[in-house]
Image: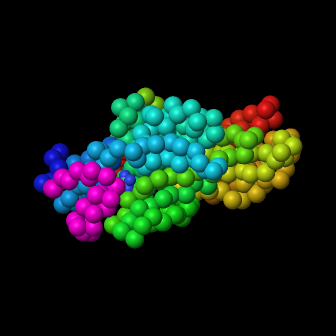
Amino acid sequence: MRINELEFKTARNLAHALDLLGRAGQGAKILAGGTDLVLNLKKKRVNTNTLISLHRLTGLDYVKEEAGVIRIGAMAKHEDLAKDRRLREKTDILCQAVGLIGSWQIRNAGTIGGNICNASPAGDSLPPLLVLDAELVIAGPDGDTLMPVNSFFKGPGQTGLRPDQILKEIRIPVPPENSAGCYMKLRRRKAVDISIAGVAFQAGTDSSGQVLESVGIALGGVAPTPVRVPAAEAMLTGLSIEDSLGKIEDCADACADTARPIDDIRASAGYKRTIVNVFARRCARHVLTTLKEN
Ligand SMILES: Cc1cc2nc3c(=O)[nH]c(=O)nc-3n(C[C@H](O)[C@H](O)[C@H](O)COP(=O)(O)OP(=O)(O)OC[C@H]3O[C@@H](n4cnc5c(N)ncnc54)[C@H](O)[C@@H]3O)c2cc1C
């Protein structure tokens, strides 16, 4: 499997990358860690005449917190995010998810920006970012724009990014003090593979610590894009933790009803729906029990 001949350009900084992208025209592609793109070029699933590599860019792999918002540079690598102390404290669900991506080799090369822009319905960082209400900072020739992650995904491999734009940063509002999250995914046993189905569950209480103020539930791998499940979220929001524990079965059923999986080489649609139900139950129980014990 050989990659077709193409021009390879290395960006010195983000402004240079945008300039190269603008000059190269429609067909150019951004290269981050290359774990998806290089494979897709080899398999001829993607075709381009120009690659613009971000690998020499410094300063786009940060994690910082400012004014109640966590800011993650698009070039941050999964392995670094999985181990980041601040993220583990505040948005552990994201650390859990990126820590489950591929093998350590993939996690040391692959970036969060690449995971988002690749827009695989099964991308592991996506359901956690949905439940954390993340926003994306998109750089382009006219400056930066903000887009909620919820409206970024348009279909498998399809995003709201224009050909002359680059994902620069992910912004996550710091969740309330008493919050917890859980991400579970199913993948083939003993395989370094993307998920068959994944469930993200994030919840936080009000200041009394007793009532669920916010609940976010999202599914991966069971629809053309990752999806939130507002019907299931509404069943638990506003309830006491004790009452919400009694609603877990209904909530898991609502998740399975929302899933629109298809039969594929990895699993049947019916099996994926069952997995969503089981994982939604397990994630909910884990999060609610954690909140109760805090
Ligand atoms: C063996 C193997 C196992 C894997 N396992 C998993 C898994 O368990 N879970 C999972 O979610 N994924 C998995 N993946 C997929 C992949 O590793 C991840 O999606 C990774 O995060 C991609 O990041 P990257 O930096 O390598 O992106 P690249 O391959 O460099 O780019 C991916 C796409 O995003 C675009 N892009 C990248 N960065 C930007 C940017 N800043 N702005 C605009 N466009 C951009 C590129 O043009 C390209 O279209 C696996 C891949 C392999 C090969």
| Quadrant where the C terminus is found in the figure | top right
Asked if residue 195 shows in the view, the reply is no
- Nearer-the-camera pick, 160 or 14: 14
Q: Is residue 9 magenta?
A: yes
Task: Residue lying at the far front in this picture: please name it.
Answer: 67
User: Which residue is drawn at the image coordinates 52% and 63% (left, top)?
Assistant: 147
User: Which residue is drawn at the image coordinates 32% and 47% (left, top)?
Assistant: 57
Would residue 20 appear left or right of 245 to someone viewing this image? left
Q: Is residue 201 positioned above or below 136 on the image?
A: above
- Nearer-the-camera pick, 8 or 192: 8
User: Which residue is drawn at the image coordinates 53% and 55% (left, top)?
Assistant: 226
Q: Is residue 227 magenta?
A: no
Asked if residue 71 shows in the view, the reply is yes
User: What x and y, as percent, mark residue 108?
Assistant: 38, 34
Would residue 118 appear left or right of 205 to someone viewing this image? left
| Quadrant where the N terminus is found in the figure | top left
Count numbered badges in the picture: 0
Q: Is residue 207 positioned above or below 291 on the image?
A: below
Task: Residue lying at the far left in this picture: please name it.
Answer: 5
User: Which residue is drawn at the image coordinates 43% and 55% (left, top)?
Assistant: 168
Task: Residue lying at the far bottom in this picture: please name it.
Answer: 142
- Nearer-the-camera pick, 225 or 151: 151
- Nearer-the-camera pick, 21 or 120: 21
User: What x and y, as percent, mark residue 68?
Assistant: 65, 49
User: What x and y, as percent, mark residue 32?
Assistant: 33, 48
Would residue 175 appear left or right of 263 to someone viewing this image? right
Which region of the structure is painted magenta? 6-28
User: What x and y, as percent, mark residue 124?
Assistant: 50, 44
Instruction: State the colouring used for the structure image.
Output: rainbow
